[in-house]
Each structure stands twice: as C-alpha cells, then as structure tokens.
Image: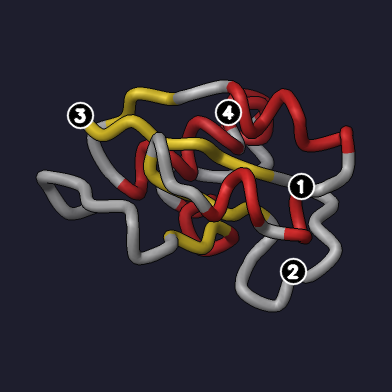
C-alpha cells in the first residue's frame, strides 16, 4: 500500500489532470501555489492508503462508478501522479 494525498478537483491548472496525486509527506503539497486556496486544506491533510494508480482513480470516482456513468479503472486517466508516488504494483 502507498499513502497518498489526492488534491482536486477545481485545480487552477488542470493541464496534467483534474486531480494531482502526491506521496504522503511530499513537500510540494505544502509549498505549491496551486494548492494555496483553503478549498484544498482537506485534501492536503487527508491521506489515502491505496495499492495502485487504478485504485486511486476508483477512489476519486467512486460515486460515478456506483451510479454507472463510469467503469472501474476509467478515472485513473484524470489523475496526475507526481514522481514522488511509487506503487508496489502497477495498475
């Protein structure tokens, strides 16, 4: 399992994805101007314990998957994983 912060949606710059994923403890979470808004305070403090990139996408889009508007695994394409994130297994 990998502990990560998932920041978003509504990021000022979504050119890399609607959500940014950082490893727990990554200094960019606190110092990036993209996350300066109080809107992201909860995202910066909450940590997910996830096994894979696909699991991160499924976590973010769980409500869409539950309602049937997305399939499991589709959401990963809207997440940008910073180099600090390392999952033990791919997917």
Q: Earlier in the sequence, mark 3 or mark 4?
A: 3
Residue located at (23% from left, 52% from top): 86
What is the CA distance from the residue labelled 3 to the residue labelled 4?
19 Å
- The residue carrying mark 2 is 14
Local secondary structure at mark 4: helix
Q: Nearer the viewer, residue 59 or 86?
A: 86
Residue located at (38% from left, 43% from top): 23
- The residue carrying mark 4 is 62
Verify CB contact (< 8 Å) between mark 2 and mark 1.
yes
What is the CA distance from the residue labelled 1 to the residue labelled 4?
14 Å
Give the quarter of the image for residue 50: top left
Q: Nearer the viewer, residue 18 or 39?
A: 39
Q: Is residue 36 left or right of residue 53?
A: right
Give the quarter of the image for residue 39: top right
Q: Earlier in the sequence, mark 1 or mark 4?
A: 1
Q: Which residue of the protein is positioned furthest toward the left in this rendering?
A: 88
Local secondary structure at mark 1: loop
Q: Neighbour class for label 4 at 10 Å: few (<14), some, many (≥20)?
A: some
- The residue carrying mark 1 is 9
Q: Neighbour class for label 2 at 10 Å: few (<14), some, many (≥20)?
A: some
Verify CB contact (< 8 Å) between mark 3 and mark 4.
no
Q: Earlier in the sequence, mark 4 or mark 2?
A: 2
- The residue carrying mark 3 is 1
Q: Neighbour class for label 1 at 10 Å: few (<14), some, many (≥20)?
A: some
What is the CA distance from the residue labelled 3 to the residue labelled 1?
23 Å
Local secondary structure at mark 3: loop
């Amino acid at each position: 399992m990998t502990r990560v912060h998932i920041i978003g949606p509504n990021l000022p710059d979504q050119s890399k994805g609607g959500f940014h994923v950082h490893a727990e403890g990554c200094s960019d979470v606190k110092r990036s101007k993209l996350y300066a808004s109080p809107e992201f305070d909860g995202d910066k403090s909450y940590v997910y314990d996830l096994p894979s990139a696909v699991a991160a996408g499924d976590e973010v889009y769980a409500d869409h998957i539950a309602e049937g508007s997305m399939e499991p695994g589709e959401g990963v394409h809207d997440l940008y994983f910073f180099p600090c994130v390392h999952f033990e297994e791919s997917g």
